[in-house]
Image: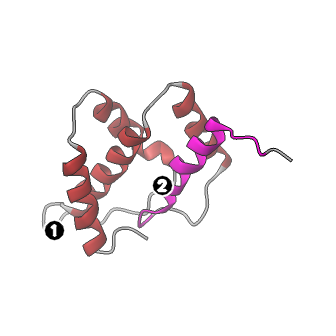
Amino acid sequence: MKLSINPRSDYVERVLKLYLGLALTPARVSRLDRQLAENFYDEMIELEQIEAALILVSVRRLIRAPGAPDLGPIRSLHYFVPVIEEVRGLAISPDYIAYLRRRLDKVKWLK
């Protein structure tokens, strides 16, 4: 029996895994999160751009002014859409994203 490879399904699962791997995100995805990940595939948004946006949002949430009000948990993948759009217009070094990922890991921001 031959196994079929579905690039769209693989892409969607990778996006959702990245999303669920962050602190303060739900334990599972919603139907709307899955639909949004499918839209990202249809719009041909690179996985690297999505990952960069997820990491940048996490870092921005960590580096806040002292005394700033606490932020609640992230409830939807839609929360990241503005930063995904921002990242698409930038040239961010993969080395910089790797650096930020290591920093997040040190503060246990990644699950």
Which residue is at 30% across, 70% downward?
105
Residue 68 in the image: above or below residue 60: below
State whether the magenta stretch is mostly helix, strand or loop. helix
Percent of width and height locating residue 14: 53, 49
Point out the tag, 2 or 1, that comes first from the N-terminus.
2
- Spatial CA distance of label 2 from label 1 is 27 Å
Q: What segment carries the magenta color?
A: 3-24
Q: Which amino acid does label 2 sit on?
A: Tyr
Q: Which residue lies furthest to the left in this view?
A: 66
Percent of width and height locating residue 109: 34, 69
Q: Inspect the magenta stretch and tell me whether residue 22 lies in it.
A: yes
55 horizontally vs 26: left or right: left
Residue 11 quadrant = top right
Does residue 23 appear anywhere in the picture? yes
Percent of width and height locating residue 17: 53, 56
State the quadrant of the C terminus: bottom left
Residue 26 quadrant = bottom right
Q: Inspect the magenta stretch and tell me whether residue 86 lies in it.
A: no
For disc 2, the marked residue is 19
